[in-house]
Image: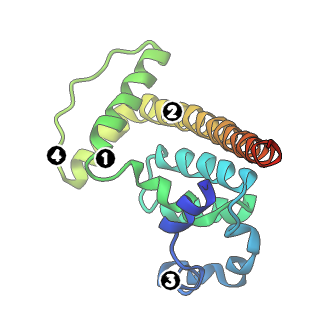
Amino acid sequence: MAKKIIRRFMPDVHIIRNHKNLKFFGKLLHDPNLWHLNRRSVSGAFAVGLFMAFVPMPFQMIPAAALAILFRVNLPISVALVWITNPITMPPVFYFTYTLGTWILDKPVLDIEFEISWDWITYELHRIWKPFLLGSLLTAAVCAAAGYFTMRALWRWHVVREWEQRKNRRTQKKAP
């Protein structure tokens, strides 16, 4: 059942292999492990996707795809999970990671007024990069571990439940 639900939302393998932004991976995309839906590949994909979602860098989907290929986990899930941090969710998520980093480093939270300009990025990022990066990496690691173990547990729970239902159906058929 879980595989059926996930497969319904998965894009076609051939579309992804021929995607213009993923062409540079070449033959690496032909590894069947990148497309399997099993407990190992899905939980690993959650770990990769959630980790890369909280890493503050542009084009997070490319490193997520590279890590999925490297660890041989489900590629579409890894890339899709990166979109947890999208233009709408990035400001609150990255503010949280910044405040987490300041709390860990025992530094005060600076009052920052956001402005879209190169000067702002070079000046303000220079002031906040240590707590911001520390908070982001810590959040990424915790979310990746939580996603990995949660998916492993959910997958196992689902399989055990299916076995139990199958066993109950067999015993009901045998009973007169």
> CA gap, disc 2 to disc 4?
25 Å
Type of amino acid under label 4: Glu
Q: Which type of secondary structure does the marked residue at label 2 adopt?
A: helix
Q: Is residue 155 above or below residue 61?
A: above
Q: Which type of secondary structure does the marked residue at label 4 adopt?
A: loop
Label 2 CA crowd tier, 10 Å (few <14, some 14–19, many 20+): many
Tell me if 17 is positioned left or right of 106 in this view.
right
At 54% from the left and 38% from the top, the residue drawn is: 140
Of marks 4 and 1, the one in the foreground: 4
Disc 4 target residue: 115
Q: Is residue 105 above or below residue 66?
A: above
Of marks 3 and 4, the one in the foreground: 3
Label 1 CA crowd tier, 10 Å (few <14, some 14–19, many 20+): few
Q: Say which quadrant the N terminus sits in.
A: bottom right
Q: Of callouts 2 and 4, which one flags the residue occurring earlier in the amino acid sequence? A: 4
Disc 3 target residue: 19
> CA gap, disc 4 to disc 1?
11 Å
Which residue is more in the foreground, 23 or 1?
1
> CA gap, disc 3 to disc 1?
34 Å
Type of amino acid under label 3: His
Number of numbered discs visible in the structure rendering: 4
Q: Of callouts 4 and 1, which one flags the residue occurring earlier in the amino acid sequence? A: 4
Of marks 3 and 1, the one in the foreground: 3
Type of amino acid under label 2: Thr
> CA gap, disc 1 to disc 2?
24 Å
Label 4 CA crowd tier, 10 Å (few <14, some 14–19, many 20+): few
Disc 1 target residue: 122
